[in-house]
Amino acid sequence: METTKKKGKGLTYTGFVLLLVFAGITVLSFVFYNQINDPVNGWFAVSKWVENADGQTVLVPIDDMSPLLRFVYSIIPKLIKTAQVLFITLLVLYIACTVIRLVFKNTPRRITIGKLVNSIVKVVIWVACVIAVLAVWGMNVGALIASAGVLTLIIGLGMQSLIADVVAGIFLVCDGTLQVGDIVTIDGWRGTVQEIGIRNTKLINYSGDIRVANNSTIKIFINQSREDSYPTVLVGIPYEENLQHVKDVFEANKTKIKEMCPSLLSDIDFNGVEELADSSVNLHFGAKCKEGDFFAAQRQMRGAIKTVFEENGICVPFPQIVLHEEEKK
């Protein structure tokens, strides 16, 4: 769960460093505004005032400046304005992520909604950033926005699966059937829900492997976190052992066995004989625990039952084969 908590806390380390760099450029651009933006007397001047034949003062390019230097000088102010846009974008992004994290917290459902809102807000902010950068570099943003409706229709027809993923993700969050922190099984893969994004859902299992599933493909899943789990184990005893004696030993040591299994929420149940196997009579035991402790509870039960049985002279048999030789007449 620690990985889940770290996600969505705002900017990464790299983003924070970029924020500081762009902030420095923005501050310097305001301090030296005239030196940067003045096309005649500034640091990056590419023009000069001259008097023409009619006696009028006009602005003309500097004759002795190389084309390469003129190009570099002309784009430096645009690069600085781009840095200003990126600074504002990262600052707004950091503030938005922080506000979302503070508002949507405490409960799994609120955290799940917060992560979805966080994903949507990021997309909106970065789209606005791209439009602002294009405006800085002289593109007609009005025409771009006006054509966005037709472009959206074309993209929508070609990206139906993406739209299905987004809609499915919204319904997963709104229905509350899947939340961040839930332990679920999807297509036979068991893991903890790490994030429900606008396009996909991320699961992480006990070994740290991450599985990403598109929201629209999550049709049937098992949510194992809403109720206490009931892990079961099979413990074998020899065929020669008296079954009633084994049951009496277990009942007499039930409290001791429970104390040896800290992950359990209830006493262990003896559910009788599960299987008459080749080398042993397999007994079925079970108890309640939290889903996150499922595998730990199974290991603890096996160890505790084996220890108690051995202390009372009940051995756990190993696989064996009995051979019968035919008598010669």
Image: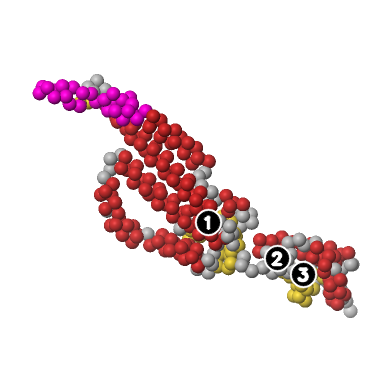
| Region in magenta | 32-59
What secondary structure is found at the residue carrying circle 2? loop
> In the rendered image, is residue 276 in sight?
no
Which residue is at 48% across, 45% downward?
Answer: 94
- Closer to the N terminus: mark 2 or mark 3? 3
Q: CA distance from mark 2 to mark 3?
A: 10 Å
Q: Position of residue 245 (x, y in %)?
A: 87, 75
Farthest top residue in view: 64
What secondary structure is found at the residue carrying circle 3? loop
Q: Which residue is mark 3?
A: 268
* Amino acid type, residue under disc 3 in the picture: Ile
Farthest left residue in view: 54
Q: CA distance from mark 3 to mark 1?
A: 39 Å
Q: In which quadrant of the rendered image does the C terminus lie?
A: bottom right
What label sits on residue 104 in the rendered view? 1
Q: Position of residue 11 (x, y in %)?
A: 50, 45
> In the rendered image, is residue 13 in sight?
yes
Which residue is at 30% across, 54% downward?
Answer: 148
Which residue is at 31% across, 40% downward?
Answer: 136
Q: Mark 1 or 2, which is nearer the eye?
A: 1
Find out whether residue 55 is within the magenta segment. Answer: yes
Q: Position of residue 116 (x, y in %)?
A: 48, 57
Q: Which residue is mark 2?
A: 289
> How many numbered discs?
3
Most foreground residue, 112 or 220: 112
When asked about the image quadrant of residue 326, the answer is bottom right
Label 2 Cα neighbours within 10 Å, binned few <14 / some 14-19 / many ≥20: many
Q: CA distance from mark 1 to mark 2?
A: 28 Å
